Amino acid sequence: MAKHHIETTVNGDATEFLCETEDTLLDVLRDTLQLTGSKEGCASGDCGACSVMLDGRLVCSCLVLGCEVAGRKVDTIEGVAKGQALHPLQQKFLEHAALQCGICTPGFIVASKALLERNPNPTDTEIRYWLAGNLCRCTGYDKIVTAVKDAAVALRKG
Amino acid sequence: MRYEAPETAESAAALLAATADARVLAGGTDLLVQMRSDIVDPALIVDIKRITETRRVTEENGGWRVGAAVTGAELKEHPRLKKVWPGVVEAANLIGSTQVQGRATLGGNLCNGSPAADSVPALIAAGAVATVAGPQGRRDIPVEDVMLGPRKLALTRGEFVLSFLLPPRPPRSSDAYLRFIPRSEMDIAVVGAGVSLTIDSGGTITAARVSLGAVAPRVLLVREAATAIIGSRLEKEAQDRLEAAARAACTPIDDKRGTVEFRIQVAGVLTRRAALIALDRARTS
């Protein structure tokens, strides 16, 4: 059958694409829109590497169908930096070496940004619970938590 | 595979009725995983999230109507629901990660048909009624009667859960849900226990409902456990009767997450603890 023609907004830009019913939002982002920052780790909602914002809500893009985003707003890791200017979270992940292989990093940044927008001064425990759905198999969690806390400080200073 | 996102319950029911192998899509946190693992391969997916009634939380005759596709994150942020039904909201919020909370729904948790679904014991303890839409119109089913067994529902072809009605709450009422998992987050209940109760001004329990998950082929409403504490102030003797009644209701399986013996033991402990939390909340509600 014919592909679905979907009109949506990605990182603030009006976007349209064609997809099959079974294509996930992650498939569409990576393979159709060439936005390859979101990663496929598990494809079952366990690892968080594909985290994006859908209508302002943190979700795994592997658990969303491309069809579902018609008329909605999608924000991905590609929209986090402003041109060449890194977001404080990105800067702090670099400064604290909060990444090793880097596959989980886009998901951690997107999820952490969602946390800090709701809670500008989270505790370690709040950060760890919020990020429980983001897995890092290089297991650099302590550095990630430190980077998020430091980014929170930077964001509060403005 | 077709995809439809109708805007009315009637058109959703008509679509579901017209295709033998159709699946309802709410949050997708179970359906998409099952599709990916080739457990299901539906001919039609009916996304119910464009139906307004599935997506809103409204007061109704002193109770609360919660749409089947309202997410865990939305329940958590609701300004009043958590005060009236803390057990229902905490149960829904135990499901999965922050990302999963952004998508997972009460309707999906029930209709996925797992005996270990976290929100279901809390809904059953709450006395929630599911409003089901279908080709013949709508009907109300108590949540404890929706699930028949693993992956088996009492819904006929074309029917789907549209919303839940949480009943009006008398003064000094509250609820609680506890589950056991071997780690602190992100796991499936080995046992889940939901308790809802009402006390009079003297602290005596006048009404109660107790529900257990993951200890039988379906989530159980345990009337004997409620009877064991109604008329009491949850003294030690009443707690012992409650534990015994909860254990007696269990017919669990052995699996990698827990043995029969362990599940029965834990069911008693969690039921007692959930009742004590609900009682404490009822005193201060």
Image (tube, rainbow, N blue to C red):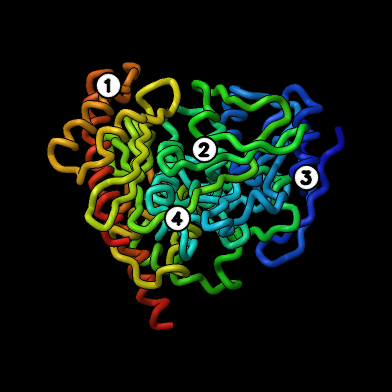
Q: Which marked residue is nearer to the observer: mark 1 or mark 4?
A: 1
Amino acid type, residue under disc 2 in the picture: Asn
Q: Which mark is residue B248?
A: 1
Residue under disc 1 on the same chain as residue under disc 4: no
Using the rendered image, report if marks 2 and 4 lie on a common chain. no
**Up-down: is B210 above or below B155?**
below
Question: For the residues marked 2 and 3, what is the alpha-carbon distance in whole angstroms?
Answer: 21 Å
**Residue type, numbered disc 4:** Phe
Secondary structure type for disc 2: helix
Looking at this view, is B100 or B283 the one in front?
B283
Identify which residue is drawn at 42% across, 48% down: B88
Q: Chain of mark 2?
A: B
- Please rate how many residues cluster around mark 1, counting C-alpha atoms within 10 Å: few if below 14, some from 14 to 19, many from 20: some
Q: Residues within 10 Å of mark 2 (few under 14, many from 20)?
A: many
Measured as percent of width and height from the top left, residue B163 is found at 61, 45
Residue behind mark 4: A108
Q: Which residue is mark 3?
A: B6
- Residue at image coords 26%, 58%: B201
Measure the alpha-carbon separation of dots 1 and 4: 45 Å
Report the quarter where the C terminus of chain B lies. Answer: bottom left
Q: Nearer the viewer, mark 1 or mark 2?
A: 1
Which quadrant of the structure image shows residue B253?
Answer: top left
